Image: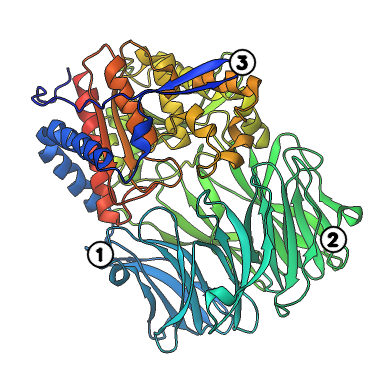
Amino acid sequence: MTSLQPIVVQPPIARQQETATTIHGHRLVDHYAWLREKTSPEVIAFLEQENAYTNAIMKPTGELQAKLYAEMVDHIKESDVSVPFRDKDYFYYSRTEQAAQYPIYCRKHGSLDAAEEIILDMNRMAAGEGFLALGALTVSDDGNLLAYSTDTTGFRQYTLHIKDLRTGEVLADQAQRVGSVVWAAGNRILFYTVEDEATKRQYQFFRHTLGTPQAEDALVYEEADERFNVGAGRTRDGKYILLESASHTASEEQFLPADDPEGRWTMIEPRRENIEYYADHRDGLWYLRVNDTARTFRLVTAPAATPGRAHWRESIAHREDVMLEELELFQSFAVVAERSNGLPQMRVMFFDNQGAFEGPSRQIAFPEPTYSAHPHVNREFVTGKFRYGYQSLVSPTSVYEYDVRTNESTLLKELEVPGGFDRSQYRSERLFATAPDGTRIPVSIVYRKDKKGEGTNPLYLYGYGSYGYSLPVGFSSNRLSLLDRGFVLAYAHVRGGGDMGKPWHDAGRLMHKMNTFTDFIAVTEYLTANGYGDPRRVAIEGGSAGGLLMGAVANMRPDLYRAIVSHVPFVDVMNTMLDPTLPLTIAEYEEWGDPNHAEAFAYMLQYSPYDNLASKAYPAMLVKTSLHDSQVMYWEPAKYVAKLRTLKSDDNLLLLETNMSAGHGGASGRYDYLKEIALDYAFLLQELEQG
């Protein structure tokens, strides 16, 4: 046992009721499928019993949790203001107030010296609600009308509202299950996408005229292919509305002049399998980032009148070792966001009179060995300035403004970290572990210099490795509570993520998914072998698809880990991917494979955490979920814990906590969220400090 108080209560034991499915000659047996009945009193009672058990076990850490929470609050500037950005006649920003859970969205007309106008106070909106999330937030061209969407359950089911900013009145206009929202020019018509209620796929695109009921909205487009979601936006120059249909591996875009909302839509280039492209417009040319010649993307241009690929002209050729991730277009220049050797880079390039790039590009320099950098809010098209965000494991979140005339960056704001933070006390490193097949896996490390020993520190390793998502190397003031107690924190940039571009993603998905797990294990062994942590005190964390990673490595190498924190984990792979009625399943075939095909089924079954639980010793686990999660249904972690309780041969803790009023991201209020982290950290400290 750990240094927690001896268990004086017994964990809940879920009843077993066999459900069997035979596919490809294999019989899948599930004894806990009954936990899917969300409205069943028995299911709710079981989740509440698990919560009560977790509360009882963690009660002795109450004082520690309170201390951790106080430390984290002490490290945030509770009353703060974001960097204002200009959009037409207004400066927009958000601010927080001490003790308030949510931000307040504001603007000032013409000058930052003007009177403040509150456009949305989420704290007032959240009164009486257990959860509140903001989706869309977009203002009409004349600045008079605000379209916004809210979710009060955590199930990502957003309702569209329109507010008259001149009077403060919220209009009667509404729409349900809304995703993207974009205004047309003229300030009377907007477009929005709608999700399918069962699968939660954004599949319909409507045109709405102010003052008319949702039932009268015109259906502009409906996406029939269940792999594809639709989304909408507007070009930075404001001239066109874009409608995108995209799967995980292919996309297409249509456009409409923003001043002709009832006009004809034009397809840029019809979809092709395994080809993605993303468009923006400048001076009669479409600029398209496309991966038709290589997975790392190239940049082409095409005339607005003839945008198809027959008219594409290459502007930036693909490079095998550089991922072209993003293009930011402005009137006189563009910023090309790239990723090279796993690190983000940004180049500024200038246009000639024909819309081609001329002269040498300028590289924006970043000073640290591992970091995150990305374009910030840049609403103005005609400008000589470009804003970007920067942070690292030791440098707080910052916003810079780059002047294209002087080639200089000016710091506009760095997140203030009160409570005695001194960045010189901490060190970050970038390392490379070697996978079993010889691939070098990047690893980002941070620790407090005066507390770093040689192989004696508790090690906390985080991983994700799916969907081509690049693991951010960002600053967290919450993390100081662990660093100041001697933890070494590490981030494994394993295959399946996008840290080294699309090829990195390809090497960790479908029939290569096992690389994600073996990469993570290799990183663990490398770090402990090289003195970054005590092999007896290694904890790991992952969430969602990262929770799949946690479940897989717990089955494969439970001996490596002392404790696991698993957030909303995708652990019931086979049952979920065999059920096309669930949200995301069909679209996810391009990430995990289609188990209706025998070869894919056999491969996925090798790593599905739920299906590979066995009678053996497992690390201590804190598994967390939310009742209203729409991405990984609550029953996956609930079933996982119920089954593991009957199999594991150890006395290590196995805890399940369900947030009964939230969704995939946990609590929506910032203070409530800190309390959730305090529980995680208390669990880790008790497990790892014992050794």
First along the sequence among labels 3 and 2: 2
Q: To which residue does mark 3 refer?
A: 438
Relative placement, left or right, of 652 versus 116 is left
Q: Position of residue 362 (x, y in %)?
A: 69, 53
Name the kind of residue labelled 2 in the image.
Answer: Pro
First along the sequence among labels 1 and 2: 1
Q: To which residue does mark 1 refer?
A: 100
Residue 89 vs 308, above or below: the answer is below
Q: Position of residue 295 (x, y in %)?
A: 73, 38
Q: Are marks 1 and 2 in contact (CB under 8 Å)?
A: no
Q: Quadrant of residue 18?
A: top left
| Distance from the alpha carbon under mark 1 to that under mark 2 | 49 Å
Q: Position of residue 357 (x, y in %)?
A: 80, 58
Query: Which callout, 1 or 2, points to the residue nearer the camera?
Result: 2
Rendered-image quadrant of the C terminus? top left
Name the kind of residue labelled 1 in the image.
Answer: Ala
Tell me if mark 3 has few (under 14), some (14-19) or many (20+) residues whose alpha carbon lies within 10 angstroms of its own: few
Q: Is residue 422 visible?
A: yes
Secondary structure under tag 1 reads loop
Name the kind of residue labelled 3 in the image.
Answer: Gly
Q: Residue at x 17, y 41 (%)?
A: 65
Residue 685 vs 99, above or below: the answer is above
Rendered-image quadrant of the N terminus? top left
Residue pushed farthest right?
Answer: 310
Query: Which callout, 3 or 2, points to the residue nearer the camera?
Result: 2
Secondary structure under tag 2 reads loop
First along the sequence among labels 3 and 1: 1
| Distance from the alpha carbon under mark 3 to that under mark 1 | 50 Å
Relative placement, left or right, of 67 versus 127 is left
Q: To which residue does mark 2 refer?
A: 307
Secondary structure under tag 3 reads loop
Q: Is residue 538 visible?
A: no
